[in-house]
Image (cartoon, grey):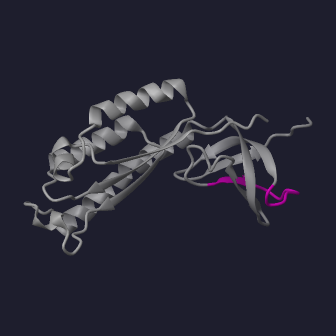
Amino acid sequence: GSRRIVPYLDMPLQHASPAVLKAMRRPAVGEKVLERLQRWRGICPELVVRSTFIVGFPGETEEDFQRLLDFLREARLDRVGCFAYSPVDGAAANDLPDPVPEELREERLERFMEVQEQISRAKLAERIGRRLTVLVDEVEEGQVVARSYADAPEIDGNVIVPGAWELEPGDFIEVEITRAGAHDLLGVPVDVEG
């Protein structure tokens, strides 16, 4: 099979609300990011985009947070990390007005992760019926655990191949994706000789 390099992009976005980005002393780039993503994906549909966000930064309002969720739904990033802000001793941010109560910071983190999980599920579901070349990681009694070659394009998880197969860790096999979950895909080997 053709081994293509999978372009992998890490964009440390942190937030999507101009007010919060300003408080973080970061450039406000929300609109431009979406335009850029669209353009890059047009050029390279396999693009894998990762980013990290912070919720509950001092001064973050419900409206700011909603902007972030809207951005997330539109950007449909492949891999997303999110942290609830925590006041680090002596950090300049501790002096910022309107700290967000801890309970609310945690609640926003949960809501953020729920939205991202729906996006991840939808992105994985789009892969049903497609073929992937995967690398065998573990051979268990009833299944093989593999991952797609270039550090799992668009999959922050594994490709599970049910059944007992004569395979060794390190083997490459081609599978057709039959089912998708929140993090993992299920596939069946494609009979290359057939």
What residue is at 26 percent from the left and 63 percent from the top?
85
Residue farthest along the left direction in this orientation: 97
The quarter holding residue 167 reads bottom right
- 137 on left or right of 179: right
Q: How many marks?
A: 0
Q: Can you say whether 129 is above or below 21 in the image? A: above
Comparing 11 with 145, the one in front is: 11
Residue 179 in the image, given as x and y percentages of width and height: 63, 45
Quarter that holds the N terminus: top right
The quarter holding residue 166 reads bottom right
Comparing 93 with 59, the one in front is: 93
Residue 75 in the image, given as x and y percentages of width and height: 38, 37
Residue 45 in the image, given as x and y percentages of width and height: 55, 30
What residue is at 77 percent from the left and 66 percent from the top?
140
What residue is at 35 percent from the left and 42 percent from the top?
72
Residue 177 in the image, given as x and y percentages of width and height: 68, 41
Q: Can you say whether 117 is above or below 88 in the image? A: above
Q: Which residues are magenta?
A: 158-170
The quarter holding residue 109 reads bottom left
What residue is at 18 percent from the left and 73 percent from the top?
90
